[in-house]
Image (cartoon, grey):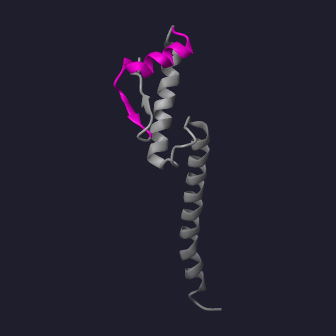
């Protein structure tokens, strides 16, 4: 048995731990991409695009809870230019972030 064997094994442990961590993060992003609204023609979103879309979507849902409008009326009003706070997931669709109350 070589004197260096335990050192080599210990050096591989952090690499494997980091690979498992990155794999776990990537799996979580894939799950998040499945639940945020997108269109089939959009390219696969980057991690930052996924996070921004999730934030906008959660804000919109929260605002929807506090409005007296019907959901369809609320979304129609928001998309018709009721606010200029928003961002594009691609060049095709703009999601609006309604101000927090």
Quick one: 36 or 91, which is closer to the camera?
Answer: 91
- In the rendered image, residue 16, in percent from the top left (x then y), is placed at 58, 68
Quick one: 58 or 84, which is closer to the camera?
Answer: 84
Q: Quadrant of residue 101?
A: top left
Residue at 44%, 46% in the rendered image: 48
Q: Is residue 11 above or below residue 19?
A: below
Image quadrant where one finds the N terminus: bottom right
Residue at 38%, 17% in the rendered image: 82
Residue 30 horizontal side relative to residue 49, left or right? right
- In the rendered image, residue 53, in percent from the top left (x then y), is placed at 48, 37
Q: Is residue 82 above or below residue 93?
A: above
Residue at 41%, 22% in the rendered image: 98
Magenta residue check for 78 = yes
- In the rendered image, residue 67, in percent from the top left (x then y), is placed at 49, 11
| Residue stretch rendered in magenta on the structure | 69-89
Q: Is residue 7 above or below residue 69?
A: below
Q: Residue furthest right?
A: 1
């Amino acid at each position: 048995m070589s004197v260096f064997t335990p050192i080599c094994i210990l050096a591989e442990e952090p690499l494997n731990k980091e690979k498992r961590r990155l794999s776990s993060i990537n799996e979580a992003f894939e799950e998040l991409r499945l639940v945020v609204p997108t269109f089939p023609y959009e390219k696969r979103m980057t991690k930052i695009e996924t996070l921004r879309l999730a934030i906008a979507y959660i804000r919109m849902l929260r605002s929807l809870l506090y409005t007296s409008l019907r959901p369809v009326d609320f979304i129609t009003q928001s998309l018709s230019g009721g606010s200029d706070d928003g961002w594009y997931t691609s060049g095709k669709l703009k999601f609006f972030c309604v101000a927090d109350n």
